[in-house]
Structure formats: C-alpha cells, structure tokens
Amino acid sequence: MDQGKKPTRMKRIGDLLQEKGITSPDALEKFLRERYEAGIVISEILQEMELIMEYQILNALSRQLHVPFIDLDGEQPVDMHVVRLMSAELVKSNKALPWRLEGDTLVVAMVDPSNQKVISNIALITGYSIKPGICSEKALEEVYQKLFSEKE
C-alpha cells in the first residue's frame, strides 16, 4: 500500500452544490443553521426555499455516492420482468425497486442507495449482485402505485 497517498474524503453535498454554482457559501451557512435548529435535512430546506430542484439534489447525491441517478419518469421504463423479483411489500418497505438487468447484475432504483442492509437483503432475495442507483422518493411512490395498486 502506498503510504504517500491520503485517503480520499467524500465531498459533502453542500460542497457539491457550491461547486455547481447552485448555492453560495453565505446561503449554505444560513440553510445549515436552519437545518440544525429544526432537525431538517439540507435538501428539504433548499427545496422549500425554492433554491434548488429535486433533480439537482439527486444528481449531486449521485456523484457523491458514486451511483447512477435513475429517472423513473424518464424515457427508459421499468423492466416488468425484473420488477417481479420483489414483492410489493418489499418494494414499499425498502423504498427500492428492481429496475433492469445489466448482465448478471440487478440495477435497483433506491431512495437511499447507501443502505447496505437493504442492498444485501435484495441480493439475498433475488440471487443477483446489486447495483444501487438513486431515485426520487416521489417518483418511486408514483411507479409503485401504477405497478402494485391494482394488486393490493
């Protein structure tokens, strides 16, 4: 192991938003203070103040977490054969939806793609290695309703 290299630090979401010119350091400091006082996450504060769109937050988180952003409202639809790998109950409780197969890897749209417990459970249930991606909670709920509401 190379002793000269420092471990890379994951960039914070606020740093990424500043780099993209989405927010200023002063505005970010105000939002962080409000977040701390109210117990609200930064993305909710920024959205409430209409300074950032949800897709901008998801794209920044995608870069921070090194996972793809999955636009469930986009042009590439959910693979219906893949969706059947998980029950409606599991999709809802884990906030994770099997989206498509890439070879022997199952790509899963997740509200929280950093949740290793959910990823491990999905791998165990489906028998596939898992590639998590981040998606909008609202979009996941809408897709869930379209796919499973008639079956419940």
Image: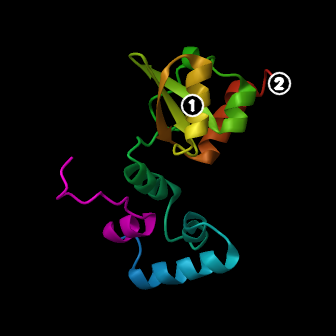
In depth, the one of 151 and 18 nearer the eye is 18
Query: In the image shown, does 50 or 112 lie closer to the viewer?
Result: 112
Residue located 62% across and 29% down the image? 121
Residue 152: numbered disc: 2
Magenta stretch encompasses residue 126: no
Q: Amino acid at mark 2?
A: Glu
Identify which amino acid the numbered label 1 is placed on.
Ser
Relative vertical location of residue 20 with respect to residue 101 in this rendering, above or below: below
Q: Which residues are magenta?
A: 1-20
Helix, strand or loop at label 2? It is loop
* Residue 86 against residue 66 in the figure, above or below: above
Q: Residue at x 42, y 16 (%)?
A: 104
Residue 150: image location, x then y, percent: 78, 23
Quadrant showing the C terminus? top right
- The percent coordinates of residue 6 (x first, y second) are 25, 60
Q: Position of residue 46 (x, y in %)?
A: 54, 70
Q: Which residue lies at the image location 44% right of the left edge and 63% below the top edge? A: 13
Q: Is residue 111 left or right of residue 11?
A: right
Colour setup of the view: rainbow
Residue 137: image location, x then y, percent: 62, 46
Q: Which mark's residue is nearer the viewer, 2 or 1?
A: 1
Q: Is residue 4 magenta?
A: yes
On screen, 111 above or below 91? Answer: below
Vertical relation: 70 (above or below) 120: below
On the image, which quarter does residue 126 sit in? top right
Query: What kind of element bears circle 1?
Result: helix
- Point out which mark residue 120 bears: 1
